[in-house]
Image (cartoon, rainbow, N blue to C red):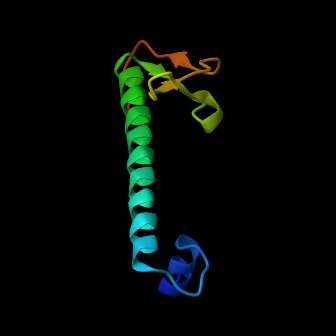
Amino acid sequence: MRDKEKCSSILPRRASFRKSELVGWVQDSVVLLMADWQYVSQVAAGLAYLHEHNVIHRDIKPENLLLGMEGEIKIGDFGWSVHSPEERYVD
């Protein structure tokens, strides 16, 4: 994707911006990206915990990620999960 296309898909479509509008928009975007990163980090930590205990979820998708009362991510729906008593490695 060319740089011009990247910018047009990220910034709202307007002819011009005041500096204060751009600064506010960038600050809001950074806060949202940080929140997204925290969610991804929590899912990764949860999957690492499961794998350390030889549990394979096998159905990670947005519908199976729940948001707790404190804003924490919880992994749900273990219907397809399996417990593998021995360690397995994929070559």
Whether residue 17 is visible, yes or no, is: yes
Quadrant of the image containing the N terminus? bottom right
Q: Which of the pair 83/69 is nearer the observer?
A: 69
Residue 52: x and y in percent read: 34, 21
Snapshot quadrant of residue 64: top right
Whether residue 88 is visible, yes or no, is: no
Residue 76: x and y in percent read: 57, 21
Name the residue at 62% across, 20% down: 77
Q: Which of the pair 84/27 is nearer the observer?
A: 27
Position above or below: 21 against 89: below
Give left or right: position of 65 versus 45: right
Quadrant of the image containing the C terminus? top left
Position above or below: 15 against 82: below
Q: Which of the pair 74/55 is nearer the observer?
A: 74
Position above or below: 34 against 38: below
Name the residue at 45% across, 51% down: 32
Name the residue at 45% across, 80% down: 18
Position above or below: 10 against 85: below
Q: Which of the pair 67/22 is nearer the observer?
A: 22
Residue 70: x and y in percent read: 44, 24
What is the tally of numbered marks visible in this picture?
0
Residue 53: x and y in percent read: 37, 16
